[in-house]
Amino acid sequence: MFLADVLSRDSGAAMSVGFGRYGKGEKNPWKMTYDEALVITSGVFTVEGPSGSVTARAGEVDYLRAGTEVVYAADEDTELVYVTYPHWLAATESSAEAHRLDDFHVA
């Protein structure tokens, strides 16, 4: 899995925009420390949460609220665009969830 910010925290913006790539079968647990919209640009992507699973395909959007425990899962090779508020990395680094950043590569 790979994430890259297009609008990074160095820009001074309070939000972030970037893209992610997940290979088929890749998944990671996460606790949202920010609000996030995921726009699936290719593939099929499932977010498992306390209320059940939501699967999105290319052209669909999934919205996640801060404070929610989720598992991101790629049902097939997937590319997506994420938009978060506040900036996801800053919000995560300053939270009790900071240890989760060790689990994947961030560019």
Image (spheres, helix red, strand yellow):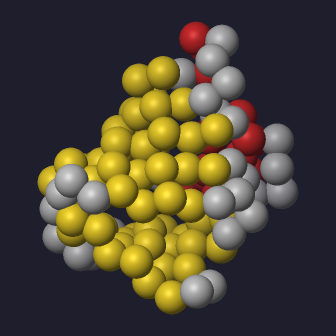
Residue 45 quadrant: bottom left
Check the image and report above or below for 4 versus 50. above
Q: Where residue 14 sits: x, y (%)?
A: 68, 24
Residue for point 48% across, 50% down: 37
Q: Is residue 72 visible?
A: yes
Determine whether, in the image, residue 95 is placed left or right of residue 70. right
Residue 89 rendering spot, x and y as whole percentages: 64, 38
Find residue 55 and report its horizontal and vertical position in percent: 32, 75
Q: How many labels were placed on the picture?
A: 0
Image check: 56 left or right of 58?
right
- Using the image, determine if residue 45 lies above or below residue 2: below
Q: Looking at the image, is 33 positioned above or below residue 23? A: above
* Near-viewer residue (16 or 23): 16
Task: Report which quarter residue 93 is drawn in.
Answer: top right
Split into 4 quadrants, where in the image is the C terminus? Answer: top left
- Residue drawn 68% across the image and 49% down it: 34
Residue at the image position 51 percent from the left and 88 percent from the top = 52
> What residue is shown at x 29% (from left), y 68% (from top)?
56
Q: Nearer the viewer, residue 62 or 103?
A: 62
- Say which quadrant the N terminus sits in: bottom left
Q: Nearer the viewer, residue 81 or 21?
A: 81
Q: Is residue 77 visible?
A: no
* Extreme-top residue of the structure: 11
**29 over 12 or under it: above or below:** below
User: Would you say 52 lies left or right of 35 here?
Assistant: left
